[in-house]
Image (cartoon, rainbow, N blue to C red):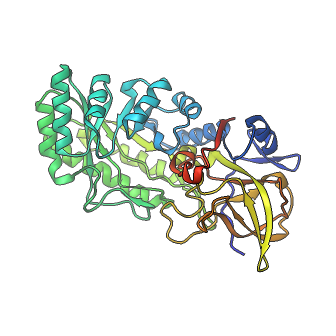
């Protein structure tokens, strides 16, 4: 048998079934009309944000990185619970506007911004996190054409990285940001050009579960920002410190110690360099805010045995849950937290593989899992499905189409 990841603490049991937001999985599927279905819990998100705000210093602003989950209802819900929104495309900008976010609440990062995206962002008053000197020139040209002072920040490519992070966003050659040694000259140029100078964006990595690694990285970010500001001779009105907060997907993963991170930041803020005393600090979080709030429900449509191995074949799969299938950056495939939603209170009694409906051996949702005996018609729940699920998976593959989504 292969172990399953830990089920997040935001769900319970009702009438023997998994309950999400106080409603059973089967009731939610009935309301949605069919499976597969992503369900996102308002209560889980609210609790997570409350826990985070209680642990972090009051001066920290929380930004939602909408690439984690841009589902429109969820995006509107987040607007009432966070202080800003981080986007990475013109398409996300349009979604953000439809959800009611004000341009001044939005910052736009990401390499390869098209000229039309830069023009639209400058015209609207979105903060552009500049990824290159060339992008800076294009932003200044757009501002000159429009006759406005653009809101500009510099995304810094730091020389350090976030230890133990799932994705390295800093350290060495990267497509992201401007190498730190070139930042002061550009910062002076922007301020001299009369832009609405917004400071720095420094993001060193993502999906880290080691609090000490995050603490070290945040200390490095603060030190680097202060040094770059001094070298450039410019103020730092805003510092986006990135994120990197991970969630436990697999057995032996431990939840991040947010209290330790908050305590370390309090100490840092108590002894800030003079140049950062009036700075507004922000954390950019996506997965950490919504990842554990989501559940993917898929129905078993066949039960079969091959060479003594039981397969539970579902109507879902990697076309909606690429990450859970092990095909989204995972080197060695391990099981996400998975359960038989309609037999949530039953004890495990068999070993089974859960697979999707696609004609590829890559379409796996759980390998050699110890589960209650499940039959055709039962619902499978894949947890930690609130981030990088529906929007980060190839739903058009084999003509399967997107899953349903709902916020409860």
Q: Position of residue 215 (x, y in %)?
A: 41, 55
Screen quadrant of the C terminus: top right
Q: Quadrant of residue 104?
A: top left
Which residue: 58% across, 54% down? 398
Q: Position of residue 226 (x, y in %)?
A: 24, 46
Which residue: 56% across, 39% down? 49
Which residue: 62% across, 36% down? 46
Give the side of residue 187 with respect to residue 24, left or right. left
Q: Position of residue 12 (x, y in %)?
A: 78, 47
Give the side of residue 29 with respect to residue 180, left or right. right
54 or 142: nearer the viewer: 142
Give the side of residue 216 with respect to residue 68, left or right. left
Q: Position of residue 354 (x, y in %)?
A: 71, 64
Which residue: 76% across, 39% down? 28
**Which residue reaches farthest top?**
147
Screen quadrant of the N terminus: bottom right
**Image position of 90 with respect to 182: above or below:** above
Q: Is residue 278 visible?
A: no
322 or 344: nearer the viewer: 322
Q: Is residue 306 visible?
A: yes
Give the side of residue 120 with respect to residue 397, left or right. left
**Image position of 13 with respect to 308: above or below:** above
């Amino acid at each position: 048998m292969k172990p399953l990841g830990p089920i997040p603490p935001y769900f319970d049991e009702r009438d023997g079934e998994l309950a999400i937001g106080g409603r059973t999985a089967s009731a939610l599927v009935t309301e949605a009309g069919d499976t597969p279905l992503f369900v996102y819990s308002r209560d889980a998100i609210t609790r997570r944000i409350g826990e985070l705000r209680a642990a972090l210093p009051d001066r920290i602003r929380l930004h939602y990185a909408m690439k984690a989950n841009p589902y429109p209802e969820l995006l509107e819900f987040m607007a009432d619970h966070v202080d800003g929104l981080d986007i990475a495309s013109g398409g996300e900008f349009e979604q953000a506007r439809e959800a009611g976010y004000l341009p001044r609440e939005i910052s736009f990062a990401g390499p390869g911004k098209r000229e039309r995206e830069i023009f639209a962002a400058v015209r609207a008053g979105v903060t552009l996190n500049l990824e290159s000197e060339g992008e800076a020139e294009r932003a200044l040209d757009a501002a000159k054409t429009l006759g406005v002072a653009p809101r500009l920040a510099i995304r810094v490519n730091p020389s350090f990285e976030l230890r133990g992070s799932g994705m390295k966003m800093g350290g060495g050659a990267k497509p992201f940001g401007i190498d730190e040694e070139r930042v002061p000259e550009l910062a002076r140029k922007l301020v001299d050009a009369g832009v609405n100078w917004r400071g720095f964006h420094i993001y060193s990595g993502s999906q880290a579960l080691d609090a000490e690694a995050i603490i070290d990285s945040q200390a490095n970010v603060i030190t680097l920002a202060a040094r770059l500001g001094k070298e450039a001779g410019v103020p730092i009105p805003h510092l986006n410190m990135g994120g990197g907060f991970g969630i436990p997907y697999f057995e032996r993963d431990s939840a991040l110690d947010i209290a330790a991170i908050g305590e370390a930041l309090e100490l840092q803020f108590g002894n800030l360099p003079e140049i950062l005393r009036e700075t507004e600090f922000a954390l950019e979080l996506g997965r950490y805010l919504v990842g554990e709030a989501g559940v993917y429900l898929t129905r078993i449509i066949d039960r079969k045995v091959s060479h003594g191995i039981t397969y539970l074949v579902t109507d879902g799969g990697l076309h909606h849950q690429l990450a859970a299938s092990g095909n989204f950056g995972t080197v060695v495939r391990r099981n996400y937290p998975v359960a038989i939603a309609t037999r949530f209170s039953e004890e495990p009694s068999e070993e089974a593989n859960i697979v999707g409906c696609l004609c590829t051996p890559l379409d796996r949702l759980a390998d050699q899992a110890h589960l209650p005996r499940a039959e055709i018609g039962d619902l499978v729940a894949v947890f930690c499905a609130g981030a990088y699920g529906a929007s980060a998976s190839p739903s058009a593959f084999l003509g399967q189409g997107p899953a349903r989504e709902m916020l409860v």
